[in-house]
Amino acid sequence: MKTKILLKEADMPTHWYNVMADMPNPPAPPLGPDGNPVGPEALAAIFPEELIKQEMSAERWIPIPDEVREVLRLWRPSPLYRAHRLEQALKTPAKIYYKNEAVSPAGSHKPNTAVAQAYYNQQAGIKRLATETGAGQWGSSLALAGQMFGLEVRVFMVKISYEQKPYRRSMMRTWGADVFASPTDMTNAGRTILKQDPDSPGSLGIAISEAVEEAAGREDTNYALGSVLNHVLLHQTVIGEEAKKQLEMVGEYPDMIFAPCGGGSNFGGIAFPFFADKAAGKEVKLVAVEPTSCPTLTKGIYAYDFGDAIGLTPLLKMYTLGHDFVPPGIHAGGLRYHGDSALVSQLHYEGLVDALAVPQLETFEAGVLFARHEGIIPAPESTHAIAAAVREARKCAETGEPKTLLFNLSGHGHFDMSSYDRYFAGELVDYDYPDEAIKESLAHLPKVKFDFS
Ligand SMILES: *Cc1c(COP(=O)(O)O)cnc(C)c1O
């Protein structure tokens, strides 16, 4: 019986799949401060034209430039695994497959889009990219990608993570990026915050403001975002395209697909190529898995809201907990976002994509179970998908159903070992975000002139 199902380099996808082409209804347009839809011009100050085109495109297939495929080839196609040992441990008749995105140099799926974004910026004559990073997954992915295309990369890293995750910082520097603890005194946004609170630990919202200010203020500098936007999800569809081919090689098709969901990019990446079949009538359940402490899809509402904490971005129609929602300090940093991708949100609203929230302790329990049987130590984000697949496999053990399950192992946890330590020490707790607190944040949603729903 096969454990690793491998594609040849020549089998790497040549096109990205754009789910917009198969959606029953297009997602609602982003709105500017005046309440009108934002046009491409508004985005041109911080994004290159090709990415803006992809953001708005409804073409089903978009070619992947050869230069991008050449870099992706350093680790793609990524392996698909059959989790034989996990299945045995669970005594389940279910077949469990997982796509291993931890094999990228940065250790997660994020370089799939970082490489494409760096390429299009270089083609547009841009010399520098500015971005923010929380735990450091995105910053290290963009540092790697910038290096591959000769771009300078400047990363504003949330100060508290800068101090707590020194090795992510070292990775970025090894790949040639400049990393600063945000808030810095280099931007107006940073200086304003420091004046109010010189000891500010920083936040993703502040770091975004600093990166966007830098990109908007300099001709040679653009901004890059690691999730949420349509073009980011588009670039991640290589995951699902490859997985589909790999399952075909062993004569399988999944009944259910699970992925952790923060901004929606690795979920969209693995699920959307299968959505094309679902739109054509095939039965497959696509499940986005989130923490009970940041339950965007399961407890948020579908409304226009800002993408950042401060209110600088255009308004996006999405599931949101409110832009001033402050998620508790859970150990899956990549899943602590108040909103979600517009594409995933629209599909969930229409009942075409399912969502499930799992508590923190269950995710670590599943992560340790996985590590002890499959070997790989998963990122705390990825353990959410594992926990959901384990739940389903246990159900199958009760009912006797031999379901085929697929999940995305979005990254490894080598830089998150202190979280595992805290779990073993019994210091982690479950946290259900209280309904009243969600209501409070939702009361601050921006009022919009038009709602296109
Ligand atoms: C960033 C991250 C996520 C969550 O981001 P999405 O955009 O929802 O994919 C999940 N897993 C890992 C390992 C990450 O680094």
Image (cartoon, rainbow, N blue to C red):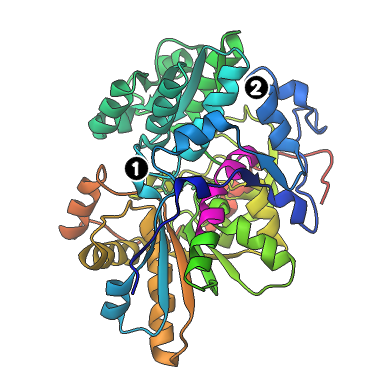
Q: Residue 172's quadrant in the figure?
A: top left
The residue that mark 1 highlights is 107
Q: Position of residue 410 (x, y in %)?
A: 41, 51
Q: Position of residue 162 (x, y in %)?
A: 30, 28
Left or right of 282? Residue 198 is left
Q: Can the viewer see residue 109 in this picture?
A: yes
Q: Position of residue 137 (x, y in %)?
A: 38, 37
Dot 1 crowding, Cα within 10 Å, few <14, some 14–19, many 20+: many
Dominant SS type (magenta): helix
Q: CA distance from mark 1 to mark 2?
A: 26 Å
Kind of residue at badge 1: Gly
Residue at the image point whose x is 75% and y is 56% from the top: 22
Residue 145's place in the image compared with 123, above or below, is below
**Residue 48's disc number:** 2
Q: Residue 431's quadrant in the figure?
A: bottom left
Q: Give the secondary structure at mark 2.
A: loop
Residue at the image point whose x is 64% and y is 30% from the top: 313
Left or right of 118? Residue 73 is left
* Residue 240 sits inside the magenta stretch: yes
Kind of residue at badge 2: Pro
Q: Quadrant of the N terminus?
A: bottom left
Residue closer to the observer: 43 or 120: 120
